[in-house]
Amino acid sequence: MTSTPHRLSDLSTPCLLVDQAPLLHNLETMSLALPGPRCRPHVKAHKCTALAAKQVAAGHAGLTCATAREALGLAAAGLGTDILLANEVVDADRLRALAGADARITIAVDSDETARRAARAGLKEVVIDVDVGLHRCGCRPSDAGRLAAQATSLGLTVRGVMGYEGHAVGVPDREERERLTRQAMEFLIEAHAAVGGELITAGGTGTYDCNTWANEIQAGSYLLMDTAYGKLNLPFEQALLVLATVTSVSDGWAVADCGLKALGMDHGLPTLLSGTVRGVHDEHILFEADELPSVGDRVYVVPAHVDPTVAYHEAFWVTDGEEVVDRFQVDLRGW
Amino acid sequence: MTSTPHRLSDLSTPCLLVDQAPLLHNLETMSLALPGPRCRPHVKAHKCTALAAKQVAAGHAGLTCATAREALGLAAAGLGTDILLANEVVDADRLRALAGADARITIAVDSDETARRAARAGLKEVVIDVDVGLHRCGCRPSDAGRLAAQATSLGLTVRGVMGYEGHAVGVPDREERERLTRQAMEFLIEAHAAVGGELITAGGTGTYDCNTWANEIQAGSYLLMDTAYGKLNLPFEQALLVLATVTSVSDGWAVADCGLKALGMDHGLPTLLSGTVRGVHDEHILFEADELPSVGDRVYVVPAHVDPTVAYHEAFWVTDGEEVVDRFQVDLRGW
């Protein structure tokens, strides 16, 4: 590709497409449902400062991220009004870089050791990460008050509590999702009673409208969406596609150039807008269709899981119908 | 990381490690079993010209790759003696770049259309890709002679046939693996009888010592290995690890910083040298262990599938015990 592509047909494949109309719909839908600081968009889903800037422009000045690289990249892009690094970081070099960034960065701690390392590196503000039932990171709810006091004694300002109901966000049945969210948030409210602070931060795309206990929701996938969240009957539309080209057609199946190195596979097979996926190999997607395409035809793949799909790619091509209107670098990859 | 790390303890995580001793063992074992042109190493597994150069230095001047980017990167690195792009490519820009590269590049074709596009771009040499039972790409064995004549009529030189027994390479039972390989190679030999040419190219790490019909084997995974091939009782050793750091420890489990964006997941969960993996999230690996580690401890993760794991990373750190002896860029990523 020597010049900037202006049409879909100019793009080499596989590549990520972001369809502008559903992108704008998703931005607007979220900013109406959870205006301003009620949503703290999680950038780990797109790893892209250009998309994060759109979320900030939609009113959400505070952002969430999962890695030091994401936090530092947001800071460098001038998006550092209020960054929450919603994960434990223990690397001394990275913690020092975070402390030195030109941004307000708050980091999650769930143990004396993570609090000590944050304080030693010169970080100022933390949230107490509480295990609300996902059983990943987070202290026990009953230990949150003690840990907050410990953090305070180290000179850290404790801004509140965080608890991710990751075991609830993807549950297809809405009643069950609400039940699990309520149960999880009871733990978080218990912890907050002991910790205090202005932040009760939780949630994700799947619980954005039923988690009424948290005062901010860390939704990320809503912006681009994937087939997993697509099953939840949420008001967000599929904005992310992988464009692929058919390279081989046989009796009853065809192959396109979108394989395991272009797709996160932990949620299972992706889907195809026009065909049934039979399997995915390193550089191939195999599919069946009522009417098989020809070699050179384009097909559209919908990823099963947005986050690890995007992390394989260098850029998004922003599209409006057949027109390519922009290119956004996936500039927050790595750690 | 400001200076070049010299010790494992200097490395930020997650990151790829290549252990030098098993790497050299694997290089030597293959070059003894399939010396010189009997092995045409597949670089898609490591996407790294520094590792490809070691395979060439071990006597395998011819290399296999799966994407135009890999072929062009090998050519630019001076490794273009005899590159086989073992995949169909239909992108006109990429085909022209391949035709213009300072390298001998042979490309797979499996249809009139792929042959036409290769010829139109100025490529000179092809192999006829035959479906030997994997049912991915490849023409029917009975169509190989006709397609070869068609390619010849377009001015292309047909160097022989290719057929990947991908449905056999990973079968744990050796007798069944051999049976499927024999069956697959009967198709390839049938095609070769109609096509002619010096190349009968096939195979992979799992069939490197039982595919005695092909005259060259496209083995890739043998160099670094993964848990899937680790089950096949092959003489290759695990050289690739992902180094991770423990960030959180709870009652009965711990979490380290090696998640879905650091691991190919299509072959299922990775394994841990010291613990049992319970799950993998975007930036977290959850595990149990008889003796739980402390926050800040290092753990070693063995990927289930080498290819899509490596494709997430920028570099390999080459290690000798606790010492970091080199850094190899994963410089063939993308397409």
Image (cartoon, coloured by chain):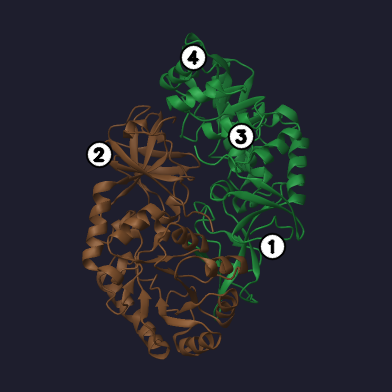
Chain colours: A green, B brown
In what element is the residue under mark 3? loop
Measure how far apart labels 3 and 1 are at the Cα level. Answer: 39 Å
Number of the front mark, 3 or 1 = 1
Q: Chain of mark 1?
A: A
Q: Chain of mark 4?
A: A
- Give coordinates of residue B122: x percent, y percent: 56, 75
Residue picked out by circle 2: B321
Q: Residues within 10 Å of mark 2 (few under 14, many from 20)?
A: few
Residue picked out by circle 4: A151
Res B235 seen here: no
Residue picked out by circle 1: A10
Split into 4 quadrants, where in the image is the C terminus of chain B? bottom right
Type of the residue with mark 2: Gly
Say whether mark 1 and mark 3 are on the same chain.
yes
In what element is the residue under mark 2? loop
Does B217 appear above or below B50?
Answer: below
Res A240 seen here: yes
Left or right of B96 in this view: A281: left
Q: Nearer the viewer, residue B248 or A84?
A: A84
Say whether mark 1 and mark 2 are on the same chain.
no
Type of the residue with mark 1: Asp
Marks 1 and 2: in contact by CB < 8 Å?
no
Measure how far apart labels 2 and 1 are at the Cα level. Answer: 48 Å
Left or right of B50 in this view: A230: right
Number of the front mark, 4 or 3 = 4
Q: Earlier in the sequence, mark 3 or mark 1?
A: 1
Does B5 appear above or below A274?
Answer: above
Measure how far apart labels 3 and 2 are at the Cα level. Answer: 43 Å
In what element is the residue under mark 1? helix
Type of the residue with mark 4: Ala
